[in-house]
C-alpha cells in the first residue's frame, strides 16, 4: 500500500491541491493533524480530504477550534485565525473534526500530531525530545507533524540515544527494522525556510518513505487571507516559509 502523508495543512487549499496534483499514485491519505487554523479555507480543505480514503488525527489548532483549549494559550495571530475558523466551519465539518482521534495506530505505524508521549502539544525539535518518545513507548515507526519542519529521528539501540537528521530529498528513506520518528513537514505553512508545500509518501510494501516538495500559488492563499481579514504576519510568512 502507498500512503500520502500530509500534515499541518492549516486550511490552505491551494497548497493541498498542489500536493494532490504532484503526488505519485497512492491508495489513501494519512493526515497528521492541524487540518485547520491560520488559513482561509477550512471547509474546503476538510471536504477535499474526505474525497479520499482518509485516516487523520487531531492537531492542536483543530483542538483549539473545537473549544477544547483556552484560545489565550495561542499567540494573538493564531488566536484570531482560530476564532475566525470556529465561526466559519459548517456543522458537518465541525462534527468531522470533533470525531478525529488524538492518535492512531495503523498497521505498524503510529500516527500523532506532536509526539507519541504527548500527541497534541509536544514539539520534537531535537534528539533529546525524540529520545523521550522512543523510551516512552516501544513503537517501530511514528509519523508526526506540529513543528512544520521535515526531519528524521532514529533510535540507536546500542547507545540508547536518538539521532536527528535532515530529510534526503533525492533518495527514499529505507525503513527496514529501524525505529524511527518521521516528520514530513507542513503542507500549508512550512517553517524551514522553503515556502513550497512539503509532504511524504509511505510505501509499506517496499518499506520506504520519500520526502517531497511542490510549489503552489502562495498569492492565491494570501489574497484569500486578506479577504478574510487575517493578520498581516500570517499572510506574509507564507512566502518566506517561516
Image: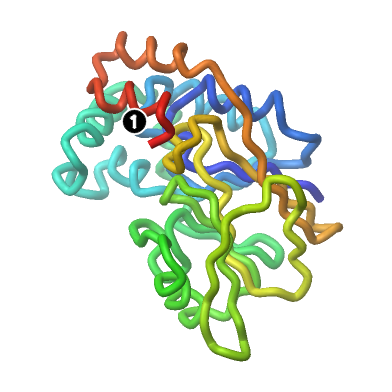
As drawn, the residue found furthest toward the right would be 206
Q: Residue at x 26, y 26 (%)?
A: 233
Where residue 139 sits, quadrant-wise, is bottom right
Q: Residues within 10 Å of mark 1 (few under 14, many from 20)?
A: many
Q: Secondary structure at mark 1?
A: loop
Instruction: Work out whether residue 234 or residue 41 is closer to the camera in this orientation and state it.
Output: 234
In the rendered structure, the answer to whether residue 158 lies left or right of residue 134 reads: right
Q: Residue at x 53, y 20 (%)?
A: 14
Residue 153 rendering spot, x and y as whole percentages: 56, 67
Instruction: Work out whether residue 227 or residue 64 is closer to the camera in this orientation and state it.
Output: 227
Where residue 151 sits, quadrant-wise, is bottom right
Q: How is the image coloured?
A: rainbow
Q: Residue at x 57, y 80 (%)?
A: 138
Residue 184 rendering spot, x and y as whole percentages: 58, 48
Q: Which residue is mark 1?
A: 38
Q: Is residue 180 visible?
A: yes
In the rendered structure, the answer to whether residue 2 lies left or right of residue 118 reads: right
Instruction: Work out whether residue 153 or residue 15 is closer to the camera in this orientation and state it.
Output: 153
Residue 161 rendering spot, x and y as whole percentages: 52, 82
Q: Is residue 100 visible?
A: no
Residue 146 rendering spot, x and y as whole percentages: 42, 50
Q: Residue at x 62, y 68 (%)?
A: 180
Total numbered circles: 1
Q: Is residue 8 above or below residue 232?
A: below
Q: Is residue 188 above or below residue 90?
A: below
Q: Quadrant of the C terminus?
A: top left
In the rendered structure, the answer to whether residue 67 lies left or right of residue 166 reads: left
Where residue 108 sits, quadrant-wise, is bottom right
Q: Is residue 99 above or below residue 216?
A: below
Amino acid at each position: 500500500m502507498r500512503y500520502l502523508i500530509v500534515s499541518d495543512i492549516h486550511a490552505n487549499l491551494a497548497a493541498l491541491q498542489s500536493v494532490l496534483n504532484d503526488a505519485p499514485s497512492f491508495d489513501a491519505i494519512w493526515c497528521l493533524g492541524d487540518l485547520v487554523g491560520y488559513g482561509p479555507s477550512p471547509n474546503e480543505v476538510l471536504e477535499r480530504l474526505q474525497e479520499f480514503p482518509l485516516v487523520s488525527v487531531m492537531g492542536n489548532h483543530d483542538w483549539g477550534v473545537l473549544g477544547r483549549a483556552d484560545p489565550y494559550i495561542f499567540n494573538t495571530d493564531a488566536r484570531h485565525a482560530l476564532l475566525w475558523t470556529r465561526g466559519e466551519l459548517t456543522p458537518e465539518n465541525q462534527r468531522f473534526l470533533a470525531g478525529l482521534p488524538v492518535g492512531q495506530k495503523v498497521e505498524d505505524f503510529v500516527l500523532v500530531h506532536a509526539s507519541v508521549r504527548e500527541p497534541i502539544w509536544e514539539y520534537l525539535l531535537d534528539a533529546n525530545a525524540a529520545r523521550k518518545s522512543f523510551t516512552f513507548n516501544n513503537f517501530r515507526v511514528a509519523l508526526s507533524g506540529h513543528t512544520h519542519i521535515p526531519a528524521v529521528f532514529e533510535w540507536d539501540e546500542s547507545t540508547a540515544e536518538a539521532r536527528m537528521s535532515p530529510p534526503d530529498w533525492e533518495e527514499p528513506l529505507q525503513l527496514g527494522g529501524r525505529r524511527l520518528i518521521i516528520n514530513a513537514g507542513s503542507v500549508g505553512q512550512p517553517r524551514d525556510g522553503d515556502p513550497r508545500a512539503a509532504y511524504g509518501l509511505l510505501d509499506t510494501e517496499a518499506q520506504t518513505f520519500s520526502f517531497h516538495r511542490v510549489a503552489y500559488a502562495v498569492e492565491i492563499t494570501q489574497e484569500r487571507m486578506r479577504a478574510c481579514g487575517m493578520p498581516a504576519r500570517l499572510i506574509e510568512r507564507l512566502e518566506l516559509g517561516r
